[in-house]
Amino acid sequence: MIRVEDVRKRFPGAASATLDGVSFTLEKGGLAAILGPSGSGKSTLLRCIVGLERPDTGSIHLGGQAGLVFQSFELFPHLTVLGNCTLAQRLVAGRSRDEAEARARQLLEELGLGHRLEAWPEMLSGGQRQRVAIARALAMEPAVLLYDEPTSALDPSLRREVVETLRRVGALGMTQLVVTHDVQLARAAETVLVLDHGHLVEQGPPAQVLDAPRHEATRRLLAQAND
């Protein structure tokens, strides 16, 4: 579960707060998407949840550590798929090579990459590299997995592959939170949250938020996405 309570963040010299009293709760095992225009506070909220930024006030409860899948994947080019998914397990979690490889093989198989264990990142498609990054994060057994714009580094034709990957991860019982500009990707979530100028202006299932928005900021965002 993710519980965010009255989180506020204002950077030095900024005219206004980047996050201004954001509060929400997401149940364990669900998939949620955060939408909002550039400058709305999405990325700052993500960084606060994962611990890369500290809120000025408020609290964030995850029930454990958070894993982050970077926008550019950040795979090590000199390591194979298996090597990328075992390095942190061995160096940070202190697992043996056999333990780390067993965990990585299981996850890569579940994400449809069991046949690419010895491949180098440069040999993979964008969607495959993303799945390796997800497996690497899952191998550390986080309480929640966060994604920073998971479709922005991919060809638009791979959107369906991203959605399928998120569903596979969800089937493992993982709580997932996606920061995105992609309205179609947000439709695959159970919950959609809309940020505008640091405020959470709308929250609910996609059918309500995306098809019958109540807030003007949401209607404006959707109109821009359809242009």
Image (cartoon, grey):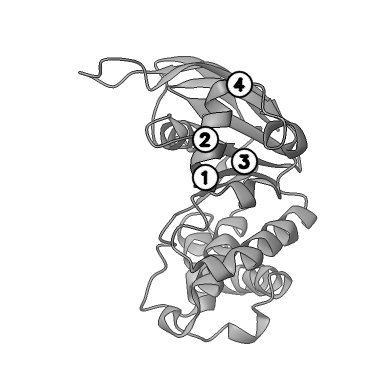
Q: Earlier in the sequence, mark 2 or mark 4?
A: 4
Q: Quadrant of the N terminus?
A: top right
Residue 33, labelled with which disc? 3
Read off the residue under disc 1.
Answer: 225
Mark 3 and mark 4: Cα distance apart in space: 17 Å
Name the outermost residue toward the left: 13
The answer to whether mark 3 and mark 4 are in CB contact below 8 A is no
Mark 4 and mark 1: Cα distance apart in space: 16 Å
The crowd level at tag 2 (other Cα within 10 Å; few <14, some 14-19, many 20+) is some
Secondary structure under the numbered disc 2 in the rendered image: helix
Mark 1 and mark 2: Cα distance apart in space: 6 Å
Amino acid type, residue under disc 3 in the picture: Ala
| On screen, residue 107 above or below 192 | below
Read off the residue under disc 2.
Answer: 221
Q: Earlier in the sequence, mark 1 or mark 3?
A: 3
The answer to whether mark 3 and mark 2 are in CB contact below 8 A is no
| On screen, residue 217 above or below 94 | above
Residue drawn at x 28%, y 22% as measured from the top left: 11
Counting from the top left corner in percent of width and height, residue 81 is at 51, 77
Secondary structure under the numbered disc 3 in the rendered image: strand
The crowd level at tag 1 (other Cα within 10 Å; few <14, some 14-19, many 20+) is few
Counting from the top left corner in percent of width and height, residue 112 is at 69, 76
Observer able to see residue 96: no
Name the outermost residue toward the front: 227
Secondary structure under the numbered disc 4 in the rendered image: loop
Amino acid type, residue under disc 1 in the picture: Ala
Read off the residue under disc 4.
Answer: 215
Q: Earlier in the sequence, mark 4 or mark 1?
A: 4
Mark 1 and mark 3: Cα distance apart in space: 15 Å
Amino acid type, residue under disc 2 in the picture: Leu
* Residue 48 found in image quarter: top left
